[in-house]
Image (cartoon, rainbow, N blue to C red):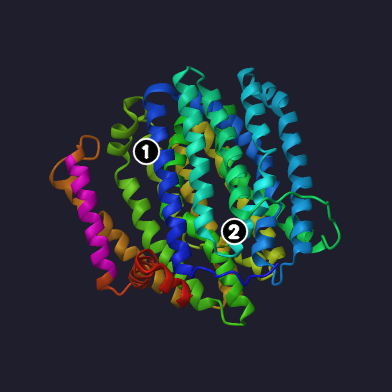
Amino acid sequence: MSDDTPQMSVRTAAAWAIGSQYASFALQFVTSVILARWFISPAELGLFSISFAAVTIVAFLQDFGVTRYVNGERELTREKLATAFTVSVAFAWGIALLAIASAGPIAAFYGDARLFGITRIIAASYLLVPLAIVPQATCQRRMDYKSNTMIEVGSAVANAAAALSLAVMGYGAAALAWGAFAQQAARLVVSQLRAGPMIPWPLRIKGAEPVLKIGGTNSVISTCYSINSRAPELVIGRLIDNAAVGLFTRAAGLALQLRLLVAGAVTGVFYPAFRRVRDAGEPLGPPYLRVVAAYTGVTWPAMAGIATLSYPLIMMLYGPMWIATAPLLVWIALAQMCYIALPLYGDLPILLERMKGLIHRNIADTAVSVTMIVLTAPFGLVWVAAGRFVHGLVFVAIYAPFMRGMLGFTWRELLAVQAKSAIVTLAAVAPLLASYALVAGPASAGFVQCASGTLAGIACWLGALWAIRHPLFGEIAGMVGELRAVLLHPRVAAAQR
């Protein structure tokens, strides 16, 4: 399999990825607001979240590192791709069947028979996942983020249409489960159309050792990640109740959605980009610091903004039924700032074959995360949310020395980049904080006050980026220039690439 197909530049690919994320976010966000205001109660959202969390604890294993293998392999032949596809389908279908079989035990553990049917719907959707993994990975490898955009947006449209239609008909939590099923079905169809029909036949296991090596590491990492992300719902559901799960899920989901909206889409762009740098034998420290600058420069202000706006945001979007989510959102947004401080912490060690060190740190990180949840849950939701921020600080302490030793940057270089991002973050939230002091506090702030404070914050953020010569300002200018060239002069841009 050749990589001779004309490829997008990293900036153009990032622009497509961001566009995809914005479109998907808009659909998911509007859908979540409509559902929460009129059709789904905190208890129903909690019921779905428990099922979804329980299934994804094992379903996260489905990829088995195949996406990373396809994107990171130096010379990906058709034979290697066929082997990866075979391993992917065999492993993923086994995981899906295990998830389906777990529906009964999950319902029994939580003492709620409704969990049985909801869990089976969600688990069945994962039978479709493996047939989309390799097609979408091949699109990412050749930096075809136009196709990736179509896959992500198409799956988001299917999710929204199914969930809204069934919620209107009174299906409650089951509407969300069928939305998840529709999303995976659409991902399968669109990825196959964009990559060209790809099926794992004939089966091929020869040369599977590299796939299995990455897959074993990826399984440990995915298990740790899924426990980290899903343990709060599972523990809260057991120790408190479904409504508490719904409130926590709303706060965590909103913060995570905004983080992915701002920066999550470009993660898949950077992995193949760093593969090129690695293969060229160039140092990885300088480009990594630019990635840190880009991530923290845009995500820290966004997370600080959502923490500052938590009370008026929840009230205006979801209504008074969800107001208990606001204090949780403050702590969870601050925790997200910690997690984004060291981007690609799970990707670059695999690319650079530092998997043993990554596994050790993942296990330690997960142990701290679960311990914090178990210790704080008996004291209430605010304690659990505050515990996520404490875990975020521990996360930085665990991974920062590892990334520094692996990539070769200095503490001074890293802190200089992050200090600039902290400055632009303060500039971004300063107008809102000033309005709380001079006009009205967060609990009584109206739409005009919040909107004007947000717009002023964006202007201050851009001004601060320019004034302190933050590296992100040059990246934004370069991305806008490349995107304009692609849109206005596509043939010239293609020839230059």
Residue 261, relative to residue 78: is it above or below?
A: above
Residue nearest the observer in this picture, 323 or 282: 282
Q: Which residue is mark 1?
A: 327
Q: CA distance from mark 2 to mark 1?
A: 41 Å
**Closer mark to the observer between disc 2 and disc 1:** 2
User: Which residue reaches farthest front?
Assistant: 491
In percent of width and height, residue 109 lies at 68, 24
- Is residue 453 in the magenta section? yes
Left or right, 216 with respect to 365, comes to: right
Residue 486, relative to residue 321: is it above or below?
A: below
Mark number displayed over residue 238: none
Q: Point out the stretch of residues depicted in magenta.
A: 448-465
Residue nearest the observer in this picture, 84 or 388: 84
Prevailing secondary structure of the magenta residues: helix
Q: Amino acid at mark 2?
A: Cys
**Residue at the (38%, 29%) spot, across then down:** 34
User: Which residue reaches farthest left?
Assistant: 438
- The secondary element bearing badge 1 is classed as helix
Is residue 432 among the parts visible in the rendering? no
In percent of width and height, residue 347 lies at 61, 62
- Is residue 452 in the magenta section? yes
Q: Which residue is mark 2?
A: 139
**Residue at the (51%, 47%) spot, across then down:** 152
In percent of width and height, residue 232 lies at 55, 38
**Residue at the (50%, 63%) spot, across then down:** 342
Left or right, 332 with respect to 232, comes to: left
